[in-house]
Amino acid sequence: MREYDEIAEWYASDRTHPTGVPEVTVLAASVPRGARVLDIGCGNGLPITRTLLDAGHHVIGLDSSREMLARFRANLPATPVIRGLVQTSAFADEVFDAAVAWGVMFHLTHDDQAKAIASVSRVLRAGAPFLFTAGDVDDVDGGITGTMNGVTFHYFSFSVEAYRNLLSENGFTLLNVRKDPGDNTYYLARKTV
């Protein structure tokens, strides 16, 4: 994503807080040690990928930002990472035991979010958890825009019920929805078919 290329240096210095770490720690504990985990929108690898690695899992990062991936490779040189889009990922079917998409889904249009969830469902094994952050209201006007470090970003969201339906259509059961103190909304689903 071009916007993250523009803010990669700032993001690396700003993303030092543990937001998302408690939720990812719980996910990491819910699968056997050594599980294969897909970190969608892995960015520079800190702190989400690092948390998964520290829990003893085999992680593959996926991100579309060249600059964020350069920092990922510097931070976690032994961890495989691929430049690509989740909605068109070329991973084999049912190869991952879990997936995390922290700070990704709300950057995708509604159509691309649907494609992303279908893609994640395809690559996860039955019973695998999927944790992602997203909005929790339908944006009927086609999304909103905002800025991060002076760069304009577009954000898109469904309601909780719409995410529940979209997940169900793709073989997931929505287990939990919660917000953290920073107002991030977490969705935890499990692939059931």
Image: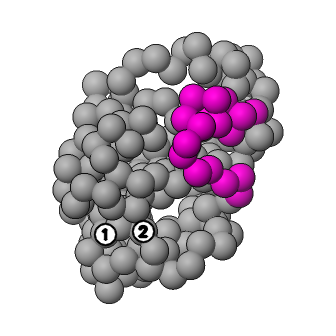
Question: Which stretch appears magenta?
Answer: 67-84
Up the image or down, 137 lies above or below 152; here it is below
Q: Given the image, on which type of amino acid does mark 2 rest?
A: Phe
Up the image or down, 24 lies above or below 36; here it is above
Q: Given the image, on which type of amino acid does mark 1 rest?
A: Ala
Disc 2 element:
loop
Q: Position of residue 180 (x, y in %)?
A: 28, 32
Q: Position of residue 123 (x, y in %)?
A: 49, 74
Decide if residue 114 is on the left or right side of residue 146: left
In the rendered structure, are the residues bearing label 1 and label 2 in contact, judged by CB atoms less than 8 Å apart?
A: yes
Q: Which residue is mark 1?
A: 128
Is residue 136 found inside the magenta-colored segment of the image?
Answer: no
Q: Which residue is mark 2?
A: 96
Report the residue at 46% width, 52% height from top: 59
Q: Is residue 160 visible?
A: no
Judging depth in this view, the residue of 133 and 13 nearest the camera is: 13
Q: Is residue 16 visible?
A: yes
Disc 1 element:
loop
Q: Position of residue 113 (x, y in %)?
A: 57, 62
